[in-house]
Amino acid sequence: MSRGRKYNPAIATAQKFAAKLHTLLLRATKGRLGGRMFDSPVLVLVTTGRKSGKRRETPLLYLEDGGVVAVIASNGGTANHPAWFLNLMSRPEAEVRLADGRAFRVRAEEARGEEKRKLWERAVSMYPAYEDYQRRTDRGIPVVVLRRM
């Protein structure tokens, strides 16, 4: 069994509710509220459910680097990848909505090698808890690059 806490169903339900509320708040206030968390920028990633085929919206911290957007599939250091990451690996085309109103189509790919190392360092600098999350789990936490289409 891999190291990392199991996902508590009650916590998962609360997180889904909080994510929906956060997304609604961003939309209703045009990014004035909810556009930053933990002093980091927030985007809404719109994926297609790999099983359901339904549209899924997930607010995530992000960083921009050289014209690409990067997000971290930490899932709080749990043993499993987040559903949005699995959705992207199944169907890599998605949409990104930034708090400032910019929206664009992207194609996702997992960063590797030097690109991953560089983006991971920037992400940890932006949000130090990512390093704690990595220590809690055996899985390598993916860094996902979202390239504009």
Image (cartoon, grey):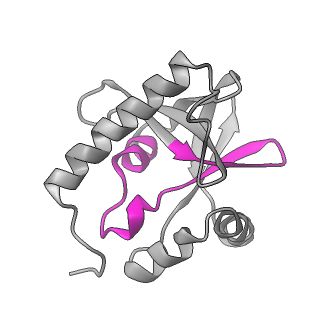
Residue 53 is at least partly visible in this image: yes
Residue 116 versus residue 16: which sits nearer the camera?
A: 16
Instruction: Examine the rendered structure and indicate whether residue 33 appears above or below residue 65.
Output: above
Number of numbered discs:
0
Q: Which residues are magenta?
A: 60-89
The answer to which of 48 and 57 lies nearer the viewer is 57
Residue shown at the point (69%, 62%) measured from the top left: 126
Viewer-proximal residue among 74 and 2: 74
Q: Position of residue 9 (x, y in %)?
A: 15, 53
Residue 113 highlighted magenta (yes or no): no
Image-quadrant location for residue 147: top right
Q: In front: 93, or 27?
A: 27
Q: Residue at x 45, y 73 (%)?
A: 133
Q: Is residue 2 left or right of residue 121?
A: left
> In this rendering, does residue 48 appear at all?
no
* Residue shown at the point (50%, 38%) measured from the top left: 92
> Toward which corner of the image does residue 139 lie, by quadrant?
bottom left
**Against 24, is 82 above or below?**
below
Q: Looking at the picture, does residue 118 appear above or below residue 102?
A: below
Q: Position of residue 59 (x, y in %)?
A: 49, 39
Instruction: Name the residue at the left extreme.
Output: 9
Q: Is residue 50 above or below residue 1?
A: above
Q: Is residue 83 magenta?
A: yes
State the residue at coordinates (30%, 76%).
Answer: 4
The N terminus lies in which quarter of the figure? Answer: bottom left
